[in-house]
Image (tube, rainbow, N blue to C red):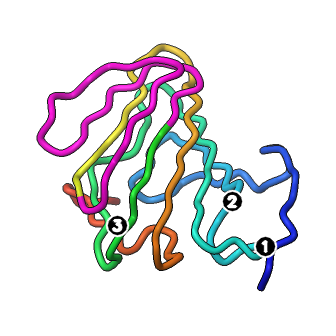
Amino acid sequence: MQSKGYIRSASEVEARKGITGHPNVTAYRLVHPGEDGVSYLLLTLDDIEPGGGIDAHYHADVDTFDHAYYVISGEIAAKVGDQEEKIVGEDTVIYFPSNVVHRIKNVGTTNAKVLRLGAAASGESHGKLVYMEPQP
């Protein structure tokens, strides 16, 4: 299906809460493979409460799924692979290559806003998520 594109705000999409491995995160899926003719791009706005974030995980069963986070506001602790955890703020990009364990956490006192971008050559939205600790 060929997309004609669209223009919409986060308020026009359903807020998603209670996503496994994403404690205290409200996610607004703005662009998603398989929806509205989108083939490869995933774009989500995450509103992360203090202490919330995305638990340590990697993406399996997909050849390539690179993604990045762009911190709009807030204070985020990020860890990529075996690199030292780093605290970052607004206007920071955090890049996660395929099959590398990664995590983020809001370590600030107010909600953080982060754009989550992903792309897979196959059009798969994220493959199988493998968390480093059991999820409830």
Question: Going by the picture, which residue comes out furthest to the top?
Answer: 109
> What x and y, as percent, mark residue 76?
40, 25
Question: Is residue 12 located in the magenta-colored stretch of the structure?
Answer: no
Q: Which residue is mark 3?
A: 129
Q: Residues within 10 Å of mark 3 (few under 14, many from 20)?
A: some
Q: Secondary structure at mark 3?
A: strand
State the residue in front, 62 or 103. 62
- Which amino acid, by three-letter code, is at mark 1? Asp
Assess whether mark 2 and mark 1 are in contact (beta carbons under 8 angstroms). Answer: yes
- Magenta-colored span: 70-99
Q: Which mark is residue 31?
A: 2
Residue located 64% across and 54% down the image: 16
> What x and y, as percent, mark residue 52?
44, 35
**How far is mark 1 from mark 2, CA to CA?**
8 Å
- Disc nearer the start of the sequence (1/2): 2
Question: Is residue 94 located in the magenta-colored stretch of the structure?
Answer: yes
Q: Secondary structure at mark 1?
A: loop
Q: Which residue is mark 1?
A: 36
Residue located 66% across and 56% down the image: 29
> What x and y, as percent, mark residue 48?
53, 34
**How far is mark 3 from mark 2, CA to CA?**
19 Å
Q: Secondary structure at mark 2?
A: strand
The quadrant of the rendering that contains the N terminus is bottom right
Labels 3, 2: front one: 2
- Which amino acid, by three-letter code, is at mark 3? Leu
Q: Is residue 15 above or below residue 49?
A: below
- Which amino acid, by three-letter code, is at mark 2? Val
With 55 as the anchor, is 124 left or right in this view? right
State the residue in front, 90 or 119. 119
> What x and y, as percent, mark residue 95?
37, 42
Q: Residues within 10 Å of mark 1 (few under 14, many from 20)?
A: some
